[in-house]
Amino acid sequence: MIATLFIALLAASSSTVPVTEQPALQCNIGPALKQFGGNEWLIYGCADGRSVVVAARAPNPAAPFVFILMPDGNGGIELRGEGNGTESATKPAYDRLSKMPSSGLAALFQEASRANGR
């Protein structure tokens, strides 16, 4: 639910692409639980089968904060972040996610998918 709302807000706030051209992602597959930077994050897969949302899980001091990772169309990953959490908690996660190859994005999606089948 949180991931779906965030995706809709992100699409609505995009200044480079009109909202009519930016499809809203449904990201409610999962969640899987993963540690980044010593804190717990929830991994949700999106209905496009390729994108994921990584949301800070309370009591993670990064909360409220989410990252959206999606293929950039050139073999890489587009990474966006939004929230009001503590930067010292979001930066380690950002550093790790920003260095992730496209195969890592696929692996995160698979983790969320497996968690969804629990």
Image (cartoon, rainbow, N blue to C red):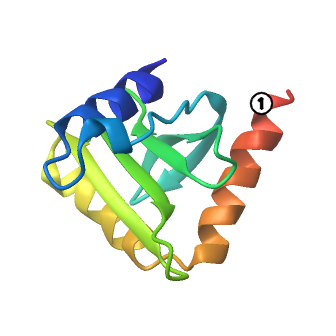
Q: Nearer the viewer, residue 6 or 72?
A: 72
Location of residue 52 with respect to 26 vertically, above or below: below
User: What residue do we see at 36% from left, 44% from top?
Assistant: 21
Query: Total of numbered circles in the picture?
Result: 1
Identify the image quadrant of residue 96. bottom left
Residue sitting farthest toward the right: 117
Name the kind of residue labelled 1 in the image: Asn
Left or right of 64: which side holds 96? right
Q: Nearer the viewer, residue 60 or 12?
A: 12
Q: Nearer the viewer, residue 46 or 90?
A: 46
Quadrant location of the C terminus in the rendered image: top right
Q: Is residue 88 visible?
A: yes
Number of other residues with Cα within 10 Å of mark 1, as a class: few under 14, some 14 to 19, many 20 or more: some
Left or right of 58: which side holds 33? right
Could you say where residue 40 lies in the image, as x and y percent from the top left? 47, 43
Identify the image quadrant of residue 72. bottom left
Could you say where residue 88 lies in the image, as x and y percent from the top left? 17, 56
Residue sitting farthest toward the top: 1
Query: Which structural element holds mark 1?
Result: helix
User: What residue do we see at 38% from left, 22% from top?
Assistant: 5
Mark 1 = which residue? 116
